[in-house]
Amino acid sequence: MKQWLILLSLCCLSSAVIAGPPVIEIEIKDHLFFPDEVRIPADTKVKLLVKNLDPTAEEFESYELNREKVIAGHSEAIIFIGPLSAGEYPFFGEFFPKTAQGKVIAE
Amino acid sequence: MLLNAVIIILREVLEAALIISVFLALSQLLNRNLWWMLLALLVGFSGATVYALNLSQISMAMEGTGQEVLNAVLHSVIFISLLIFMISVPHQAHAKWRQLNLVTIVLAVITAIIREGSEIILYITGFFGIPDLLSPVLMGSAVGAGIGLSVGVFFYYLLVNMRTSYGIWLGYLILLLIGGSMVAQAVEFMIQADYIAASAPVWDSSAIISERSAAGQLLYALVGYEATPAPEQAAAYFSSIGLLIVAAGISFMFRGKTS
């Protein structure tokens, strides 16, 4: 029994290590971000999984986060952000900036 | 839509146009054949198309960091081309150096077009299925490309019509700034892909010149301006410019020995 417990706890520990940074999903649909406000813990690295559901390409861009990544239509992309100090970090879709606006809130 | 297309295409064209015009002008000042440029343009656009068509697969390669790695490689190739170009210029009397010099020009132009052109192709082709938006986007893109190319043409004639020694010096100065910007952008992509750990910005000048403003955008294209650079980016920027100056200087001092 004790050995099983040790094995189980080892499994839990290793899966936590392998899992890496928390993943947050953002969808792009009709040139809008869903959600358009992304809350993440401050001082923590986060992996954004941005899914572009539109047929048009989009460029995820943020001056505050120093990030830019082109995402082809009907495809997805991974963007690492953080660790960030608490605050707001706007991002936008460069190809449709009028509608595609959002922000990361680190707290 | 139209204005937006103008700005997007202008931003992409401006950077490539600057690199191409400075190299064209320096080639002219160094009495080089300009036919190579045509070949470079053709290969560059073909490469950009291949990149754009395969973007999804490239993005998802290497655990989702393929795009960052490829962009970092492209920026590094431009920097290395600039470095070898600057080293080879003082040894023009030697046939082998002249050849190497030409190879670096062609390589830098091809790479710049692949990098900037792929984004333009992706942006425009996204509208192919949307006829209502396609024509304003094409119109805006044409205007943006026109403005960007005009700036390139302006720089070309500025350099070519100056006294030769001034033209070469100004061309060198622009290449130094482009070199620094290339390495800083490569580092930024490596941070984005999480190969280099992210850290807090070394300074924040967004209150003075925002990257959103026209001035910020222009400075970005000309000198690689960042309002909130990571310390690694700033270090990469200044040390790569330093490396270019030292390498060019040393090569200049040894110019008599190979000619």
Image: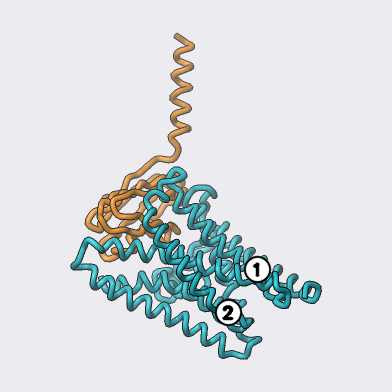
Residue B232's spot in the image, x, y percent? 57, 57
First in sequence, mark 1 or 2: give its number.
2
- Residue B100's mark? 1
Judged left or right of residue B77, residue A65 is left
> Badge 2, how many Cα within 10 Å: few under 14, some, many 20+?
few
- Residue B175's mark? none
In this rendering, the label closer to the viewer, 1 or 2: 2
The colour mode here is by chain
Residue A26's spot in the image, x, y percent? 31, 48
The chain holding disc 2 is B
Secondary structure type for disc 2? loop
> Badge 1, how many Cα within 10 Å: few under 14, some, many 20+?
some
* Visual hue assigned to chain A: orange
Residue farthest toward the left in the current orientation of the protein: B132
| Residue in the foreground of this view, choosing between B229 and B82 | B82
Determine the residue positioned at 51% across, 51% down: B198
Q: Is residue B236 above or below residue A85?
A: below
The chain holding disc 1 is B
